[in-house]
Image: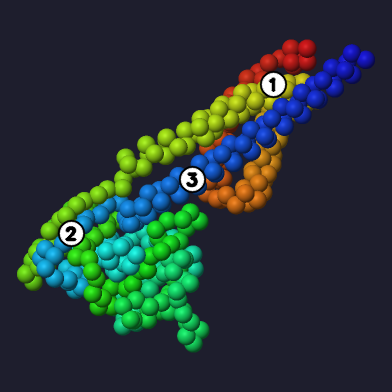
Amino acid sequence: MKAHSKALHICHSKNLISFCLVFLFFCVIILSTIVFKSILQKNLLERISRGYYGQSKITFTVNGSSSFVSINKLVTYLPKSASCALYNDNNDGTVRQIYYQGKYNTPPIISGRFFSKDDFEGKTACAVAGKNRLNKSIFKNGIRYIDYQCVKFKVIGVVGTTTSTQLDDMIFINSNYSSNSDSRLYVLDVDGTNAPAIFQKFAAAAAKDSLNAKIISTESSGLSRIIPKLLNSQILLILAIISFTLSILIITLEWVHSQYMHIAVKRMLGWKSSQLIKEMLCSYLLYVLLAVLCGFIFLIFLGEFNVFAVIDAFISTLICSMVVIIPSILKMLRIPVSEALR
């Protein structure tokens, strides 16, 4: 009777430990994905709030504010090898004439596409509109157009984010259209840290045509500006992830300990150590995969699913667990069978 009660107690303990293991992995995956997506979104909003998408920008004028020089003319002075954008905003910041080349982070696209090289070289007036601008667009022959300065621009894409930003109210137009902006400020937006060097080459080339490019301001969006805000707003979630991960390591040790009797019996039956290690690791991995599957379903339901964040959380937590579980299993297999059966 006592033996039967002890066996039931061991079985209940193993089931409880296994449940805790699945639950903790599930929590780590959920929290890690939320933090990952939050960091990406804050990074995006940080850049959108400044109106640019590279790592740094230089605001400048050309020949003071006496005259407007078209973007289409200024782009001819850009170094061909540079990954950057050159643009001019109207005074209220709602219309941007833009040119970019090389590797460059474009705004988040809801539908359609952003400008390509052909759009800057062709003669078609193209636009990419913010999602809030669509109510002012018109359809003609099945094509959407938006009006600016009495010109109908063909809408090739729609930009915006799930969070409301100034991007939703903007219109981007291609650089080869000759607009007459009410702003005399231009921005060189660089996807890298070498903005001063690129601007120096640009200014030197422009000077040969008697155009004096003068820097008004510079700004950087490096990690040094983003990380403090991220840590300040996400510290509780990050601490929770650390706590759950530490709990997983502790529960993993308990899970290995709960297998002592089971493993000892199999050792008596002649199972090899390699077979026992393989069986335990497979059992452990099944619990982890169950947690991942539950996490997948839950995140899809929440609308927070991100496959890269889930995989990252799964791999990093599993590696930490393996560091604990493998030595523990090896230590358990060195214990004499008679002692393990007590």
Vertical order, 34 against 342 (above or below):
below
Q: Is residue 187 above or below residue 318?
A: below
Residue 318 % position (x, y): 58, 36
Residue under pointer 3:
38
The three-letter code of the residue at mark 2 reads Phe
- From the image, state whether disc 3 or disc 1 is nearer to you: 3
Q: For the point 40% across and 70% down, which residue is it? A: 128
Q: Secondary structure at mark 2?
A: strand
The answer to whether residue 48 of the structure is visible from this angle is yes
Quadrant (top left, top right, bottom left, bottom right) of the C terminus: top right
Measured in 3D between alpha carbons, the distance from the residue under mark 2 to the one under mark 3, in whole angstroms, is: 33 Å
How many neighbours does mark 2 have within 10 angstroms: few (below 14), some (14-19), or many (20 or more)?
Answer: many
Q: Residue at horizontal 49%, vertical 68%?
A: 111
Secondary structure beneath dot 1 equals: helix
Residue placed under numbered mark 2 in the picture = 60
x and y percentages locating residue 141 in the rendered image: 49, 87
Q: Position of residue 212 (x, y in %)?
A: 9, 64
C-alpha span from label 2 to label 1: 67 Å
CA separation in Å, label 3 and label 1:
38 Å
